[in-house]
């Protein structure tokens, strides 16, 4: 006859092993999950089967529901290990299929759309991993002290990531068009800042002190010139955006040559936007960095030449485009004239200051040489 105590001991040992086994299986199920992101970093092959965007969106809806189920397991009490393991594994297996489809989309995606997909999908993967790790550590009790995972919050982050994925543009044209529009928004911010560079409403020293920024006549002068450039640059970007919409209607298939051309124009617009931001920053620097501004304006002019050349080469039609480009070039010329005048004036003032300094040294050898800031200030007063 079998010893009851021995039998009880064996049963307890078996249950302990089963519980340990379940936990190990649960932890083991996470090992493959970090590798899911690798699909995004592979170079798309032209032989990969094409996937429609609508298919990817349908998969995202399904996965969003699965993520909700993972979170719902913790609504009342601690879920069973087997149930938690199966739910998490099912979610990540589906997620891998989703990532593979996103990888296939990259075959027809240009750099702009591909980048947006990558950023959005990485947000999904990262938040999904956090939900999975949080669920397992909460079940096993292996989380750090005072860092108990709150599954509803982790689930909400995942669902937000899936919601944001639906905002990713479905075509290269939409992605590039949105990016071009964003350049106009950045330029508009610079324009607003330039409009704020002005004399205070009351000329008294108390009013100037209370108003915060006090701008020199030189800063005010060049802020207006920068504002003129930005205003015309915004018009160029708007016309380009209108052209891309029209061209997109005429080229719905988005062949690689068409996409490459749009990407080139986008990069030129973005580069111009970055230079305009630099130009606006220069205005807030006193004394003005004339050499830096000269270089920035030179780049703006070169970018405009490239944009015009690309539009002409592709024979994109727009009655407004030549006119807005001409106005921007005129604004750039005015800035170049103003900068050259200021540069020459600074050189003259430096020469005068050096002459005065050399004369002063005859009477006072300890006299200090004039600084660049003093030269600029004297120049502004003379104006």
Image (cartoon, rainbow, N blue to C red):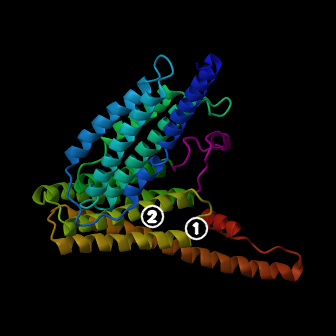
Percent coordinates x, y for residue 142 in the rendering: 62, 33
- x 27%, y 41%: residue: 59
Q: Is residue 128 left or right of residue 281?
A: left
Q: Residue furthest left?
A: 250
- In terms of depth relative to the viewer, which is nearer, 318 or 339? 318
**Quarter of the image where the C terminus is located:** bottom right
Alpha carbon distance from label 2 to label 1: 14 Å
- x 49%, y 73%: residue: 295
287 versus 146 height, above or below: below
Residue 289, numbered label: 1
Residue 198 shown in magenta: yes
- Decide which of tag 2 and tag 1 comes sooner along the chain: 2
Please report the bounds of the magenta region as a residue range. Answer: 197-216
168 versus 346 height, above or below: above
Q: Is residue 177 left or right of residue 345?
A: left
Residue 9, numbered label: none
Percent coordinates x, y for residue 27 in the rendering: 52, 40
Q: Is residue 49 left or right of residue 166?
A: left
State which quadrant residue 243 falls in: bottom left
At mark 2, the secondary structure is helix
Residue 3 shown in magenta: no
- In terms of depth relative to the viewer, which is nearer, 319 or 184? 184
Percent coordinates x, y for residue 90 in the rendering: 36, 37
- In terms of depth relative to the viewer, which is nearer, 301 or 264? 264
Q: Main secondary structure of the magenta part?
A: loop
Q: Residue furthest front?
A: 1
358 versus 271 height, above or below: below
State which quadrant residue 64 falls in: top left
Question: How many labels, in total?
Answer: 2
Would residue 149 be visible to someone looking at this image? no
The residue carrying mark 2 is 275
């Amino acid at each position: 006859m079998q010893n009851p105590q021995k039998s009880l001991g064996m049963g307890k040992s078996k249950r302990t092993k089963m519980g340990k086994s379940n936990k190990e299986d649960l932890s083991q199920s996470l090992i493959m999950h970090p590798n899911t992101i690798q699909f995004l970093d592979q170079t798309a092959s032209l032989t990969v089967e094409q996937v429609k965007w609508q298919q990817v969106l349908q998969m995202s809806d399904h996965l969003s529901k699965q993520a909700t189920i993972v979170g719902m397991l913790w609504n009342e009490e601690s879920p069973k290990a087997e149930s938690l393991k199966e739910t998490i594994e099912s979610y990540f297996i589906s997620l891998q299929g989703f990532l593979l489809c996103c990888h296939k989309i990259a075959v027809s995606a240009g750099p702009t759309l591909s980048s947006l997909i990558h950023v959005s999908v990485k947000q999904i993967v990262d938040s999904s991993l956090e939900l999975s790790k949080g669920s397992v550590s909460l079940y096993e009790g292996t989380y750090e002290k005072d860092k108990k995972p709150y599954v509803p919050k982790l689930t909400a982050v995942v669902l937000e990531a899936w919601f944001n994925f639906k905002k990713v543009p479905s075509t290269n044209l939409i992605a590039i068009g949105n990016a071009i529009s964003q350049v106009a928004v950045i330029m508009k911010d610079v324009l607003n800042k330039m409009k704020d560079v002005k004399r205070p409403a009351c000329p008294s020293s108390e009013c100037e002190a209370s108003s915060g920024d006090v701008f020199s006549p030189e800063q005010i002068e060049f802020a207006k010139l920068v504002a003129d450039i930005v205003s015309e640059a915004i018009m160029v970007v708007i016309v380009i955006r209108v052209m891309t919409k029209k061209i997109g209607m005429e080229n719905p298939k988005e062949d690689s040559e068409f996409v490459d051309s749009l990407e080139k124009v986008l990069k030129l617009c973005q580069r111009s936007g970055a230079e305009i931001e630099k130009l606006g920053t220069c205005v807030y620097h006193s004394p003005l960095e004339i050499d830096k501004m000269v270089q920035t304006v030179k780049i703006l002019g070169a970018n405009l030449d490239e944009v015009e050349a690309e539009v002409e080469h592709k024979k994109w039609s727009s009655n407004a485009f030549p006119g807005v480009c001409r106005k921007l070039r005129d604004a750039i010329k005015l800035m170049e004239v103003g900068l050259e005048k200021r540069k020459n004036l600074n050189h003259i003032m430096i020469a005068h200051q050096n002459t005065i300094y050399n004369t002063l040294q005859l009477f006072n050898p300890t006299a200090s040489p004039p600084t660049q800031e003093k030269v600029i200030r004297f120049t502004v007063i003379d104006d």
